[in-house]
Image: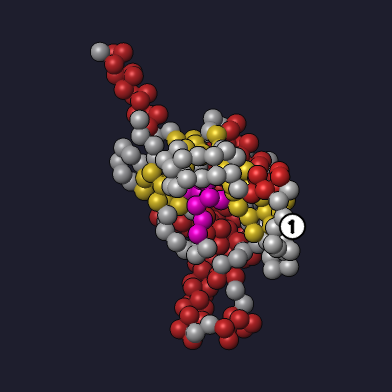
Amino acid sequence: DDDARVRAVKVRALERAMVVLEATTEAAVGAARARRDGEPRASASVIVDDVDAEGMFAWVRARGGWCALTASSASSPEGGLRGASATEDARAGEALAVVPWDALIGVEQTIVAGSSHSALCATLNQLRGLGDHVVMVIWLAATMGDAASPWARALASLPKTPSTSLAWNLTEIGGFLSPERAVSIRMYQESVRTQYDALFPALCHQVPDAFPLAIFGDYARFLLAYDIWTSYAMKVQDPETDALAEVIVPGVYLCNHALNAHSVRYTRLEQG
């Protein structure tokens, strides 16, 4: 009986241990094969290996996961694009990536797990009433660019500049938008700025060890972190409780990111 209980605990732990990316259609090797074979491209873009993303895949593997993916980025006069392609052919339903639970970028993995040894995480853990979205934005703003962070290789692959409507200059592009759309975006931008102003620099003065002014006194850092979380976080469902956790899944977000940055995406943890 004791043996059976131990095995049961291990099985439940394993059921919650991984997030699995499955091919939804037949997948053939794309950009990687094209680069290898030197196929011409009808574009002025220069396709290059994405070194930061490859480092992220290596980071996932080092934590016990694996990715049958490679990443490339395109540099063109219109701006850069990034994406991943399969490194081997796959049938629908086959796994392309497996990411351990503790390698997800979410509240449980970063703030809760780090609260015993990090002043920032300990304070954010107490501020979770603000909502997981807000505390993760604050965590990202502090941690991105920190080469000493254990999350550095996973975070290095995230964008360096904002790209959603949060950062749009409405003075320059307002003429291309409907009046209703322009008002909606302006209200969104103002609401995010209001959230920031309600927190900083007050927290910098109250808890300077957790919120140094050099980092949190810069709204641009907060804006970039907010932009990234809004774009790349996806909801993962725990098969034991059916509770949803919003996380960034390293590697997988490159494959599951629609052109509409605010699309809703749900990924279920593998069972069995």
In the picture, the quarter occupied by the C terminus is: top left
The residue at 43%/33% (across/down) is: 17
Q: Is residue 257 magenta?
A: yes
Query: Around disc 1, counting alpha carbons within 10 Å, would you say few (fewer than 14), some (14 to 19), or many (20 or more)?
Result: few
Where does residue 220 sit, x and y in percent of width and height? 64, 65
Q: Residue furthest left?
A: 1
Residue 44 in view in this figure: yes
Residue 115 in view in this figure: no
The residue at 47%/63% (across/down) is: 262
Q: Is residue 255 magenta?
A: yes
Which contiguous range is marked in magenta?
A: 246-258
Q: Is residue 237 left or right of residue 110?
A: left
Where does residue 108 sit, x and y in percent of width and height? 45, 42
Amino acid marked by disc 1 = Val
Front residue (pair 262, 254)? 254
In the picture, the quarter occupied by the N terminus is: top left
- Which picture quadrant has residue 150? top right
Would you name the residue on which mark 1 appears? 46
Q: Secondary structure at mark 1?
A: strand
